[in-house]
Image (cartoon, rainbow, N blue to C red):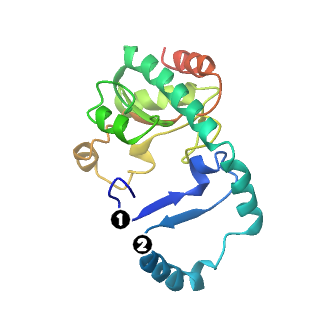
Amino acid sequence: MDLGADLVLLSISKFLAGNGTLLGGAVVGPEGFIEDIRWNTTEFIGAIMQPMEAWMTLQYLETLSMRMEKHSANTMAVAQYLKKHPKVVHVNYSGLIDHPQHDLACRQMNGHGGLLSFVLKGGMGGASTVMNSLKMIVHAVTFGTSRTICMHPPTITHEHLTPKERLKAGIDDGLIRLSVGLENPEDLIRDLDRALI
């Protein structure tokens, strides 16, 4: 909010909880607006988070800063590896100096987080081959868990768009989104290295 946002939406299910075991969300904003949201939604979704999930969230929040430091460090190591790989066309990660919003990200954040995307040569075929060759990194559409997860946006989150619309939106057919977890980064790089042969 200090950076000028009027409303902040948080998925507690992702990095805040950190392991994909619960569902939760939060809306942060001006009191009057939040009260309006609360009164208009409680009849549909309930008044409170499930007590067990609320308790688990409190437990997970105790390690959030430590986990985010590890996510960020691991993601930087993976991003630097991918940037040098000959089969990778482009890496999108704000921690890399050549990212167009690197300076802005450095001013706004303490770390660059656990999400990156990269474009492979070979389009959908290249992406499919690599993803199917991974052994340690799992396929899933979520992100922000302790395990490293990959997904293919052109066939999952943006599959409803035409190829022309995807290209206009910057969703290359060879794009893979990677949510880097808390594993040893050398193990993750070894898994990617095997898959990128």
Provide residue 92's location: percent of width, then percent of height: 36, 32
Residue position marked by numbered label 1 in the rendering: 6
Q: How would you rate the neighbour count of disc 1 (Cα within 10 Å): few for under 14, some for 14-19, many for 20 or more?
A: few
Pointer 2 with pointer 1, Cβ within 8 A: yes
Amino acid type at mark 1: Asp
Q: Is residue 189 visible?
A: yes
Q: Would residue 193 be found to the left or right of residue 98 on screen?
A: right
187 or 130: nearer the viewer = 187
Which residue appears at 49% of the width and 81% of the height?
35
Residue position marked by numbered label 2 in the rendering: 30
Compared to residue 166, the image places residue 81 above or below, namely above
Q: How would you rate the neighbour count of disc 2 (Cα within 10 Å): few for under 14, some for 14-19, many for 20 or more?
A: few
Amino acid type at mark 2: Pro
Upstream in sequence: badge 2 or badge 1: 1
Q: Secondary structure at mark 2?
A: loop
Q: Secondary structure at mark 1?
A: loop
Provide residue 152's location: percent of width, then percent of height: 45, 40
Provide residue 41's location: percent of width, then percent of height: 53, 81
Which residue appears at 35% of the width and 65% of the height?
6
Provide residue 94's location: percent of width, then percent of height: 37, 33
The label on residue 139 is none
Q: Would residue 62 be found to the left or right of residue 95 on screen?
A: right
